[in-house]
Amino acid sequence: MLYSYNILVFGDEPVKKSVDRLLRYGYDAIELVGEPDRYDWEETRKLIADGGFQAASVCNIYSGEQRDLTSADPEKRENAVKYVTKTISMAEAVGAGTVIIAPTENMRIKRELPSAEDEWAMAVENIRRCAREAEKRGIQLVIEPWNRFETHLVNRLEQAVQLASDVDMPNVAIMGDLFHMNIEEANIPRAIRDAGKWLRHTHIADNQRDLPGKGHLDWPEIIKALKDIGFTGSLVLEYIPPHADPYFAFREKVDDSVYDEHARYAIEFMRDLVERE
Ligand code: LER
Ligand code: MN
């Protein structure tokens, strides 16, 4: 298992500062924000390569109407495919092997297409189109289920597995975000074991999206389940301040004096658990 951190959490600070922080505390991997215009791709590639990270990933931001793979508006769907394709190009350019994909805009919680079957078929078709682009560049896509207040379509790991299996491409798998899983899964360790080999990436946060260990999730049981399925992907810390809109907090100025302490605490907490359990 690799220890990683979603640098979305560090607001708009320069990527070099985030990279230096993660290296200082011993992280193996880094997750970039899926905003391709925000980065100088060549500079970022160099920072990742020189830092010696073992892996990198891109957390796409499906916020805003133009990033919706299953919208009723064909133009929006095409824009969404273009957006994902651009993040795939960025991933290739910076040396990241994983890109996160989600079939609806974030916080759209109602179907727009005429039937559930139409919507599912559209999700399959458009994820497959993105996956073909990713395949050419040696990149895997992981489908992220979100809780019911952020999407109506894929809320649980088993639904993500169904979607990945319908897309039927070798470079499409799934991920789990413990915050969303706490809301939607009946039993988190069982959901992890049922997903098995499909689960390739995780977002780590406690039940209320705080740092792990600050809430009531049963971390030893979660780590045991990940070990049982032979999980070798990244444990990506995704701390999000309390707000209904997950991105709102980062549009406001956040308190950057805690970034070092969070990064240090999170890897110590996770490493201790992984080594102990
Ligand atoms: C992103 O990783 C996430 O978990 C969502 O809540 C927002 O896109
Ligand atoms: Mn997440």
Image (cartoon, grey):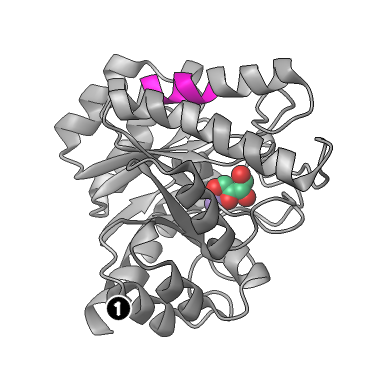
Q: Is residue 112 visible?
A: yes
Seen in the picture, residue 104 relative to 79 is either above or below; the reply is below
The residue indicated by pointer 1 is: 228
Name the image quarter holding residue 44: top left
Observer-nearest of 170 and 150: 170
Seen in the picture, residue 200 relative to 224 is either above or below; the reply is above
Image-based side of 41 in relation to 79, left or right: left
Q: Which residues are magenta?
A: 83-89
Q: Is residue 13 visible?
A: no
Q: Amino acid at mark 1?
A: Asp
Image-based side of 9 in relation to 30, left or right: right
Say whether residue 86 is magenta: yes
Q: Residue at x 25, y 69 (%)?
A: 230
Q: Quadrant of the C terminus?
A: bottom left
Q: Residues within 10 Å of mark 1 (few under 14, many from 20)?
A: few
Observer-nearest of 122 and 264: 122
Residue 104 percent across, percent down from the top left: 67, 39
Q: Residue at x 58, y 59 (%)?
A: 159
Residue 7 percent across, percent down from the top left: 45, 41
Say whether residue 119 is magenta: no
Image-based side of 179 in relation to 115, left or right: left
Image-based side of 88 in relation to 277, left or right: right
Tell me the element at label 1: helix
Magenta-drawn stretch, dominant element (helix, strand or loop): helix
Seen in the picture, residue 150 relative to 114 is either above or below; the reply is below
Q: Is mark 1 within 8 Å of ligand 2?
A: no
Q: Quadrant of the N terminus?
A: bottom left
Residue 167 percent across, percent down from the top left: 48, 42
Seen in the picture, residue 232 relative to 163 is either above or below; the reply is below
Residue 70 percent across, percent down from the top left: 69, 33
Observer-nearest of 40 and 142: 142
Q: Residue at x 28, y 24 (%)?
A: 137
